[in-house]
Image (tube, helix red, strand yellow):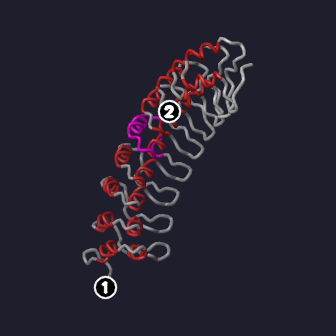
Amino acid sequence: MIPKDWMGNTPLGWAARNGHEGVVELLLARDDVELNKRDDCGRTPLGWAAWNGHEGVVRELLRRNDINPDKPNEDRQTPLTQAVCKGHEGVVKILLRRGDVDADSLDYDGRTPLLWAAHNGHEGVVKILLERDDVDPDKLDECGGTPLWWATLGEHEGVVKLLLGRDDINPDKPDDYGRTPLYLAAAYGHEEVVKLLLGRDDVNPDKPGGDGGTPFSRAACNGHLGVVEILLGRGGVNPDMPDQFGRTPLSLAAGHGHARVVKVLLGRGDVDPDMPDDDGQTPLWWAAENDNAGVMALLQAPIFVTHSTA
């Protein structure tokens, strides 16, 4: 039996990890090589070769009849998932040619290879996986996130386009906290992703999240003027909708000192500049509470004052 080092690494594991194809070939000729043994990091030699993108080593290992090409690491990630996470398209193609590799396997967090490819923005890998009939493009992870949800969060526009081109995904599916992809894109100011999502007829531009806030209120709260203007140009958006605490987009923008957003909202006829929240606090109160003098001046300007000053 070939010995391991103190970390549980065998010579085969080290050779596969570092891409030494010739050494791998020599070691595989021995009868005492533990081909599918995981080291203390939880990876098999094939897992290491896949993770590091060593295509030649992957091919060499897969020639063995006793190889387990789908043996997961300690996070239940198979060699395919490990290759996908790093964006190694060549290794992904090699593994997917085998009939004993699960293209839609779930890891410890319920994430598929496609979800990881979308999460990390590996557009080429996403294309490869979407060509397969055994890959669910809309499968949820344990937090309720879909591949589109994760691609949106990472602002991976190319991946978002690929996924939105599919008819078998729900682009408005919320996660476990009620956040849709559009909600995320608006909250983080991802303008181009917002535009892509709004291009789908089955996306509700005013769908509230678990906190009662809409994509518009999240954009206003975080001062994303570009997203605010994009959403205002889309029908079906209520710019005065309160969240679960009764705070309107204007109140949120005022409290956070986003003067440009406040100015845009005050210029509309469908926004109440004095609407109190559930605690009776108005946009002006929130601006004063947070010492936002510029916003206070906007809210008190005569052109915007709609209540009596008597």
Relative image position of residue 67 (x, y in whole percent): 65, 19
Q: In the image shown, does 80 or 50 lie closer to the viewer?
A: 50
Q: Tell me how far mark 2 sits from mark 1, CA to CA.
A: 63 Å
Relative image position of residue 70 (x, y in whole percent): 62, 25
- Total numbered labels placed on residues in the image: 2
Q: In the image shown, does 263 or 79 lie closer to the viewer?
A: 79
Q: Spot the residue most to the left.
A: 303
- Residue 86's disc number: 2
* Label 2, residues with CA under 10 Å away: few <14, some 14-19, many ≥20: some
Q: Which amino acid is tagged 1? A: Thr
Disc 1: which residue: 309
Residue occupying the point 63% across, 39% down: 108
Residue occupying the point 56% across, 28% down: 80
Q: Which amino acid is tagged 2? A: Lys
Going from N to C along the chain, the mark reached first, 2 or 1, is 2
- Decide whether residue 87 is among the magenta residues: no
Q: Secondary structure at mark 1?
A: loop
